[in-house]
C-alpha cells in the first residue's frame, strides 16, 4: 500500500490530471442534457486548470520549498537554492491556474497554459540533457514526470482549441 501511495504522490501531475478528468466526467454526466463537444471540452478545461495546474503546482510549491531535499533526491539532483525558486514560481502558476478557471477569462486561460508549457517543455529538455550527459534516469527525471512535462501542455493546448468560438 505504501508503494501505491508513493507512486500516486510522486507522480502528482498525472494523478491530478486523472482526478480532473474523472471530476469533469462526473460533471458532464450530471448535466443530463446534450452538451456540444465545445461545452464538454470547456468542463474538462476548467478541471484541468483547477487540478492539473492549480492544485498540482501548489503541491509542487510545497514539495520544492518545504521538502527540497526529498524533491531533489527524487529528481536525481543535489539540493540547491534553485529548488526554492522553482517552488515559488510554481506557486505563481498555481494561483493563475485557479484564477483562469474561476474567472472564465479566455486570455488568462491561454496565458497560463502558454506559461506552463514554457516551464514544462523547458524542464523536459533539462531532463533529456541530464539523461544524456549525466545518465540521470531517476524517476523524477526520466519517469512519468518527464512524459507529463511533454504531453500535459499539448493536452492544455488541445483543450483550448476545442473550446474556441
Image: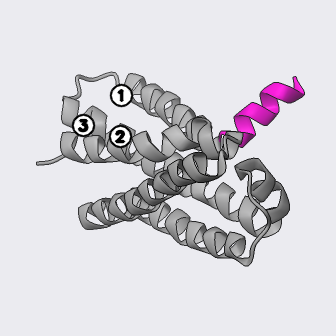
What numbered label is drawn on residue 155? 2
Name the element at disc 1: loop
Q: Position of residue 52 (x, y in %)?
A: 51, 47
- Residue 33 colored in magenta in the image: no
Name the element at disc 2: helix
Q: CA distance from mark 2 to mark 3?
A: 16 Å
Quick check: 46 left or right of 92? left
Q: Within 10 angstroms of label 2, few (less than 14), some, or many (20 or more) residues?
A: some
Q: Looking at the image, is mark 2 or mark 3 earlier in the sequence?
A: 3
Query: Which residue is pictured at 53% across the width and 53% down the height?
Result: 129
**For mark 3, what is the residue?**
39
Query: Which residue is pictured at 54% across the width and 31% down the height?
Result: 18
Q: Position of residue 125 (x, y in %)?
A: 46, 54
Quick check: 30 left or right of 63? left
Q: Within 10 angstroms of label 1, few (less than 14), some, or many (20 or more) residues?
A: few
Q: Quadrant of residue 137?
A: top right
Q: Is residue 121 above or below residue 94?
A: above
Q: Tell which residue pokes out farthest to the front in this image.
A: 133
Magenta residues?
Answer: 1-11
Q: Position of residue 31 (x, y in %)?
A: 36, 28
**For mark 1, what is the residue?**
31
Instruction: Assign the magenta stretch its main secondary structure.
Output: helix
Q: CA distance from mark 3 to mark 1?
A: 11 Å
Foreground residue among 38 and 137: 137
What numbered label is drawn on residue 136? none
Q: Is residue 114 above or below residue 32?
A: below
Foreground residue among 60 and 129: 129
Q: Tell which residue pokes out farthest to the right in this image.
A: 2
Q: Tell which residue pokes out farthest to the left in this image.
A: 165
- Residue 4 colored in magenta in the image: yes
Quick check: 26 left or right of 80? left
Q: Position of residue 107 (x, y in %)?
A: 25, 66
Amino acid at each position: 500500500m505504501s508503494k501505491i501511495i508513493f507512486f500516486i504522490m510522486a507522480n502528482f501531475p498525472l494523478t491530478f490530471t486523472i482526478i480532473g478528468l474523472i471530476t469533469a466526467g462526473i460533471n458532464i454526466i450530471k448535466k443530463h442534457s446534450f452538451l456540444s463537444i465545445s461545452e464538454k471540452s470547456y468542463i474538462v478545461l476548467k478541471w484541468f486548470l483547477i487540478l492539473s495546474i492549480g492544485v498540482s503546482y501548489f503541491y509542487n510549491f510545497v514539495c520544492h520549498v518545504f521538502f527540497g531535499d526529498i524533491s531533489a533526491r527524487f529528481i536525481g539532483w543535489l539540493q540547491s537554492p534553485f529548488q526554492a525558486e522553482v517552488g515559488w514560481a510554481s506557486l505563481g502558476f498555481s494561483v493563475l491556474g485557479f484564477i483562469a478557471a474561476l474567472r472564465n477569462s479566455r486570455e488568462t486561460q491561454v496565458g497560463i497554459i502558454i506559461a506552463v508549457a514554457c516551464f514544462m517543455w523547458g524542464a523536459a529538455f533539462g531532463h533529456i540533457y541530464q539523461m544524456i550527459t549525466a545518465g540521470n534516469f531517476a524517476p523524477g527525471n526520466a519517469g512519468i514526470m518527464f512524459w507529463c512535462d511533454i504531453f500535459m501542455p499539448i493536452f492544455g493546448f488541445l483543450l483550448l482549441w476545442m473550446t474556441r468560438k
